[in-house]
């Protein structure tokens, strides 16, 4: 077949003889669009492949996830001297209340003052005894009368005995005179007993110190009328000995024993007094779960009964691991620590706390001291997590 081709000089393309030029142009435009779509598709495929390869390369080159660093310590086990801090009220170790012993009366004088040292038997208050003195004088006169009657009865008996041998007096008369003499002697004894009783009553009118010590309170003044119902007039600290009634928690009280030393600092002064626990309360207060440890103290002007003071009581020594407070954590009322095992993973370990000292907290149970305990950064890790332990530097 022969085809005639005519060249379009303006478009630079050829057309087949007999073909419509517009139709041919449309076909050429459709081919160009097809080639454009194919090119865009190839470009998109190449771009996607590039991005995929780039992401895969980044994943392969990304470093592995780093483990958390924690500070650990192996506490070991050491001897710890226990110290218990407590507060309480100062008081006289042995208080002696003094009141009216006799029948009482009007107070004439009070020759002592609070804070004064008194000796045993010293007069603290004098009560008027003008009436009692008259009674005593009367009793003394009764003794003289009774003694005179006894002397006369004895003389009559002596004369009668001289006349018996001569037969002038019968034996019956002698017996009667003897009985008279005996009755007169008995009346003398009764009079003397009455006189002694009055003397004792008069002596009891004076209020005296039953023992030596420091006079703490004086509740009577001259001119006051006192009796057996007047209550306590004086309070004496026997020997001037003082004590601190230290309030100690139930758990700490169980660690104390009689004789352990203690230091006491009264409020308002920085002076330290040495004492020792001499008595531990056998009961615990049901309200505050505390008991009383009584610390004996020697006399000092700074130790004023009724004052407030703090005490540091030595409660013996224990051997236990010691951890800083930052290593102890708690939840639901129980304490625990985080330890790092042989695979560098965090494990929770329940513990029981012991003494609290300036150097840390003793662990009474739960640790043997060889574990690696997390002391810092424990709040940022969880059980089972792998960590990188760093041993804490001493000091």
Image (cartoon, rainbow, N blue to C red):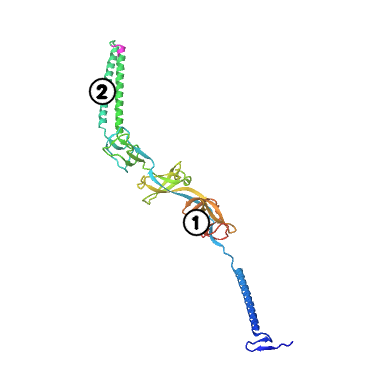
Residue 30 versus residue 4 in the image, above or below: above
Compute the Cα span from label 2 to label 1.
95 Å
Mark found first going from the N terminus, 2 or 1: 2
- Picture quarter with the N terminus: bottom right
Dot 2 corresponds to which residue? 145
Q: Say if the magenta span includes residue 192.
A: no
Secondary element under disc 2, as helix, strand or loop, is helix
The label on residue 210 is none
Outermost residue, right side = 1
Q: Residue at x 28, y 13 (%)?
A: 163
Question: Foreground residue, 233 or 130?
Answer: 233
Quadrant of the rendered image containing residue 169:
top left
Does 87 sit above or below residue 345? Answer: above
Question: Viewed as shown, does residue 92 lie left or right of 55?
Answer: left
Percent x, y of residue 198: 29, 29
x and y, in percent, of residue 140 in the image: 26, 26
Q: Which residue range is magenta in the image?
A: 169-173
Q: Which mark is residue 326?
A: 1
Q: Position of residue 136 (x, y in %)?
A: 27, 28
Of circles 2 and 1, the one toward us is: 1
Residue 76 or residue 145, whichever sits in front: 76
Question: Which residue is depicted at the point 62% across and 73% down?
Answer: 48
Q: Residues within 10 Å of mark 2 (few under 14, many from 20)?
A: some
Main secondary structure type of the part rendered in magenta:
helix
| Residue 43, picture quadrant | bottom right
User: Dot 1, how many residues are within 10 Å of its Cα: few (below 14), some (14-19), or many (20+)?
Assistant: some
Q: Is residue 370 visible?
A: no
């Amino acid at each position: 077949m022969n085809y005639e081709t005519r060249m379009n000089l303006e478009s630079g393309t050829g057309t087949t003889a007999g073909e419509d030029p517009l139709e041919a142009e449309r076909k050429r435009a459709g081919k160009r669009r097809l080639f454009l779509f194919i090119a865009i598709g190839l470009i998109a495929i190449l771009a996607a492949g590039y991005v995929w390869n780039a992401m895969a390369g980044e994943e392969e080159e990304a470093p592995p996830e780093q483990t958390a660093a924690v500070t650990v310590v192996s506490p070991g086990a050491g001897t710890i001297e226990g110290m218990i801090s407590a507060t309480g009220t100062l008081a006289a170790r042995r208080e002696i209340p003094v009141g009216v012993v006799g029948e009482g009366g009007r107070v004439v004088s009070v020759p002592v003052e609070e804070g004064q040292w008194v000796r045993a038997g010293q007069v603290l208050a004098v009560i008027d005894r003008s009436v009692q003195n008259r009674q005593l004088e009367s009793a003394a006169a009764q003794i003289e009368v009774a003694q005179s009657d006894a002397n006369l009865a004895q003389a009559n008996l002596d004369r009668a005995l001289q006349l018996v041998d001569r037969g002038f007096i019968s034996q019956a008369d002698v017996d009667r005179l003897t009985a008279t003499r005996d009755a007169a002697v008995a009346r003398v004894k009764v009079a003397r007993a009455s006189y002694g009783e009055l003397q004792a009553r008069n002596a009891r009118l004076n209020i005296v110190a039953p023992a030596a010590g420091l006079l703490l309170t004086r509740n009577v003044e001259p001119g006051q009328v006192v009796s057996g119902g007047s209550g306590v007039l004086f309070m004496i600290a026997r020997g001037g000995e003082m004590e601190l009634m230290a309030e100690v928690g139930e758990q700490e009280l169980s660690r104390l024993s009689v004789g352990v030393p203690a230091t006491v600092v009264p409020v308002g002064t920085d002076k330290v007094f040495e004492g020792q626990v001499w008595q531990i309360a056998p009961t615990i207060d049901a309200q505050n779960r505390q008991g009383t440890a009584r610390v004996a103290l020697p006399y000092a002007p700074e130790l004023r009964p009724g004052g407030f003071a703090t005490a540091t009581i030595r409660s013996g020594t224990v051997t236990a691991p010691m951890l800083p407070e930052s290593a102890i954590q708690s939840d639901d009322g129980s304490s625990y620590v985080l330890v790092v095992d042989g695979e560098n993973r965090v494990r929770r370990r329940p513990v029981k706390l012991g003494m609290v000292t300036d150097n840390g907290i003793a662990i009474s149970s739960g640790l043997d001291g060889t574990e690696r305990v997390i002391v810092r950064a424990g709040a940022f890790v969880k059980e089972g997590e792998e960590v990188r332990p760093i041993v804490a530097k001493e000091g």
